[in-house]
Image (cartoon, rainbow, N blue to C red):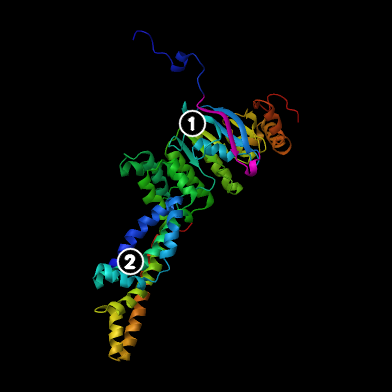
Amino acid sequence: MSEPQRNGTEHLGKPARAFLQVEGLKKAFPAAGGKADTVIFDDVNFEIDRGEFVCIIGHSGCGKTTILNVLAGLEHATSGHAFIDGRSIEGPSLDRGVVFQSHALMPWMSVRGNIGFAVRSRYPEWSRAQVDVHVQRFIDMVHLSGSESKKPAQLSCGMKQRVGIARAFSIQPKMLLLDEPFGALDALTRGSIQDELVGIVRETRQTVFMITHDVDEAILLADRIFLMSNGPGAVIAEIIENPLPRTRTRATLHRESAYYAIRNHLIDFLVNRSSGYAARAQAGKWTPLTVRPGDTPTTL
Amino acid sequence: MVAGFALAALVAIPLGFVIGMSRVLYAALDPFIQVLKPISPLAWMPLALFTLKDSSISAIFVIFVCSIWPMLINTAFGVASVRREWLDVSRTLEVGALRKAFLVILPAAAPTIMTGMRISIGIAWLVIVAAEMLVGGTGIGYFVWNEWNNLSITNILTAILLIGLVGMLLDLGFARLQRLVTYRD
């Protein structure tokens, strides 16, 4: 053992794999009557680094939720692979916390019960006291102290979604998957939960993959924004790198100089450019464009 | 009656659970359930007396047969219609089969299961009176028939009222149980 320990990836002589790696993901549904299968999306490739916050935007039906479900292990792709931390995703796992669009809390359990259920699943060997302390920490984190013994039916939509977020964080997953978590919330509630999420994610350095329909939400939260073209035959058309400083907040977001450049770019994509990728993608292997609005003048 | 009902619950709820979880089993057993369900419980009586050769055990069997179906069908339906999102949550949390059954599916299906039990107890009470008339020897049904032979209309009326009151109390009891397990969504 005289030789100094070398980094494993260096040793193999090839570049380190990204934390999350998605290769050639495709989802198709068989069509009736011998017609060609309906391809929802095809040849989806991307990587996410540890600690990165990625938002994915696209119109309904482009398969965002399917991609998220494949990453969660709840659904199988027709072809292609996803690897997390070098291991192939074969099914659901406690490695990945999921926040569902419809909060998906168990209505017969209290706030504490819902989070405790997750914590006990993650740490079955813990004593009751250990679980209680851990649960309380995450209830406090989403500012729900005082509502511990309430049932979901007694909570507002925003509070329910906070419980859902606390539940996903409480199992301390390697990666967090959020399926449009704020879609059903009013603008004011959404804003305050977004702020909380920013704070929590920055504190925990959590890796996040999130679906959203809200352009501002994506700019506020994401380090990179994936733009998906319209389905069927959807692809990740562009990858936007967010040039705004990570210290951005909702209150000051609109004063950042690059903010409007990104916003315009995203909206222009969604309104004008999101269709017509299917044919181009079919012609050959599709590589998404990486764009950094604000740095280079965009053609707007 | 209690024995027959308890036995039915012991068989119907676990079996309904399994049927509700598996679509194949549901499809396989459904025709049998549909044929057996409409048979009047009293039609089993002669067969029960013949095979079991004991009138009180036969009565238990008849109660068992009449109360099993609503519980079985409701349990299977309740278990089969547990929301997908709750199952998805348990899958992402890698919850074990037993924990999932007792902590997710059972509470989720409990209101439907309780409805089945409430229907069953109502039917069981109807049937027990008729069965006691047939079997004789004990019970309120036997009492009514005996008083008919004595031509004591007052006693018959009192017994009828009593039957109604007991039936109501049984239903109220199960309504309370049902309220205990019902959750607001």
Mark 1, chain letter? A
Going by the numbered disc 2, the residue's amino acid type is Phe
The reply, left or right, for residue A1 in relation to residue A34 is left
Residue A222 is at least partly visible in this image: no
Pick the quarter of the image with the C terminus of chain A. top right
Mark 1 or 2: the one toward you: 2
Q: Residues within 10 Å of mark 1 (few under 14, many from 20)?
A: few
> A133 or B99: which is nearer to us?
B99
Q: Position of residue A221 (x, y in %)?
A: 57, 35
**Of helix, strand and loop, which one carries label 1?**
loop
Could you say which disc has been placed on residue B24 in the image? none
Can residue B23 be seen here? yes
Whole-percent x, y for residue A98 in the image: 49, 40
The residues tagged by marks 1 and 2 sit, at their Cα atoms, a distance apart of: 60 Å
Picture layout, residue B105 above or below residue B124: above
Q: Position of residue B89 (x, y in %)?
A: 46, 45
Q: Quadrant of the N terminus of chain A?
A: top left
Bin the neighbour count of mark 2 within 10 Å (Cα to Cα): few under 14, some 14-19, many 20 and up: many
Which of the 4 image quadrants contains residue B76?
A: bottom left
Q: Measuring 57% from the left and 47% from the top, which residue is drawn there?
A: A189
Circle 2: element type? helix
Chain for disc number 2: B
In the image, residue A173 above or below residue A7: below
Q: Give the residue pinned by disc 2.
A: B64
Q: Amino acid at mark 1?
A: Arg
Q: Magenta segment range?
A: A18-35
Q: Which residue is mark 1?
A: A205
Q: In the image, is B113 to the left or to the right of A262?
A: left
Task: Determine the residue positioned at 47% across, 25% down.
Answer: A86
Disc 1 with disc 2 on a shared chain: no
Residue A33 within the segment the image draws in magenta: yes
